[in-house]
Image: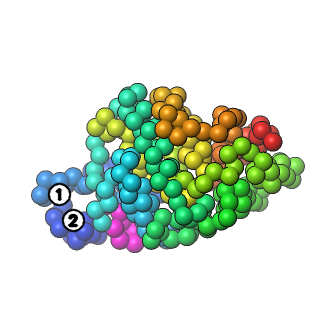
């Protein structure tokens, strides 16, 4: 019996009947596993160089599921390296599902968090976003949290790699120093997915499910800005439905780039200079 078979049997109480490798994901190998009792589960194996990643993801999924307002796969069991959740058959996105996801995301944000930067209950402070380390550290307000723990660490990493020059780095730093001037900067901490690009919305059974979260307390516009970064099906309908439940501060569209600084700089550190140039452009366009 292989390691995965043994882990699955121990955590689910059933033998493995069949394993199907799945593509996608840069932080762990994914498999669809058919159990001898007829159930199908999803098994994610994280590499050992990402310590705490499974604990962070399991805690994130449990926290997002707690309000019962947005579909999240159920966690069936976990170890230090393996996460087992319910299996979701892939489906096609449609406008109605996107609108319901928008309303659910608004209600999820309204569920709140203890502080900006707070990790999920039981989750580690040292988490991951993809293959990049990410620190969840409670802060008194959003501007200080976002600058210190979401933008500046990755700005330094990108600058150390020579992806930004001194003038470009100083520009991003100036934006970080003026975040408190943005409308809505004083918003109370929302319960965020934290890595909500389009690939982390799984369309199944006529609904949009949130997967692979890096949940923490933060600004609600951050989740919405990340959805816009790489394109999401029916995004305009999703955002309109969101605003029906949870209005955004005036000028929210002008602030999308500010909230995209974090994922753009993470991608710059992981994948290279094109993302650094996008981050600099976003900083230049900041309404400050």
Residue 239, given in percent of the width and then of the height, sits at 52, 33
Front residue of this view, candidates 212 and 44:
212
Q: Residue at x 56, y 38 (%)?
A: 247
Mark drawn on residue 128: none
Any magenta on residue 82?
yes
**Which residue appears at 45% of the width and 46% of the height?**
107
Image x and y of residue 234, in percent: 47, 28
Element type at marker 1? strand
Residue farthest along the right direction in this orientation:
167
Looking at the rendering, the stretch of residues picked out in magenta corresponds to 78-84
Residue 144 can be seen in this image: yes
Mark 1 nearby-residue class (10 Å; few <14, some 14–19, many ≥20): many
Disc 1 designates what residue?
35
**Is residue 272 at least partly visible in the picture?**
no
Q: Quadrant of the N terminus?
A: bottom left
Is the C-beta separation of discs 1 and 2 under 8 Å?
yes
Q: Of callouts 1 and 2, which one flags the residue occurring earlier in the amino acid sequence?
A: 2
Task: Please give the residue where the numbered disc 2 appears in the rendered image.
Answer: 12
């Amino acid at each position: 019996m292989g390691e995965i078979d043994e882990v699955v049997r121990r955590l689910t109480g059933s033998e493995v009947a069949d394993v199907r490798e799945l593509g996608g994901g840069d932080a762990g190998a994914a498999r669809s596993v058919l159990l001898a009792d007829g159930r199908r589960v999803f098994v994610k194996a994280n590499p050992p160089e990402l310590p705490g990643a499974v604990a962070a993801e399991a805690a994130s999924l449990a926290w997002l599921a707690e309000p019962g307002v947005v579909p999240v796969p159920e966690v069936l069991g976990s170890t230090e390296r393996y996460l087992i959740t319910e299996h979701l058959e892939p489906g096609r996105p449609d406008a109605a599902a996107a609108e319901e996801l928008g309303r659910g995301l608004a209600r999820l944000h309204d569920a709140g968090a203890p502080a900006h930067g707070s990790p999920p209950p039981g989750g580690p402070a040292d988490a991951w976003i993809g293959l990049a380390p990410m620190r969840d550290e409670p802060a008194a307000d959003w501007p200080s949290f976002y600058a210190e723990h979401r933008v500046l660490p990755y700005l330094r990493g990108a600058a150390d790699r020579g992806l930004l020059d001194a003038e470009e780095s100083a520009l991003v730093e100036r934006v970080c120093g003026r975040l408190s001037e943005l409308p809505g900067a004083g918003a109370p901490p929302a319960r965020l997915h934290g890595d909500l690009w389009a690939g982390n919305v799984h369309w199944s059974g006529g609904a949009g499910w949130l997967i692979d979260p890096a949940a923490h307390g933060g600004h609600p516009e951050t989740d919405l800005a990340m959805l816009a970064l790489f394109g999401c099906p029916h995004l305009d309908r999703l955002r309109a439905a969101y605003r029906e439940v949870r209005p955004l501060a005036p000028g929210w569209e002008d602030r999308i780039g500010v909230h995209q600084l974090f994922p753009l700089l993470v991608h710059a550190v992981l994948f290279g200079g094109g993302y650094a140039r996008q981050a600099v452009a976003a900083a230049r366009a900041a309404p400050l």
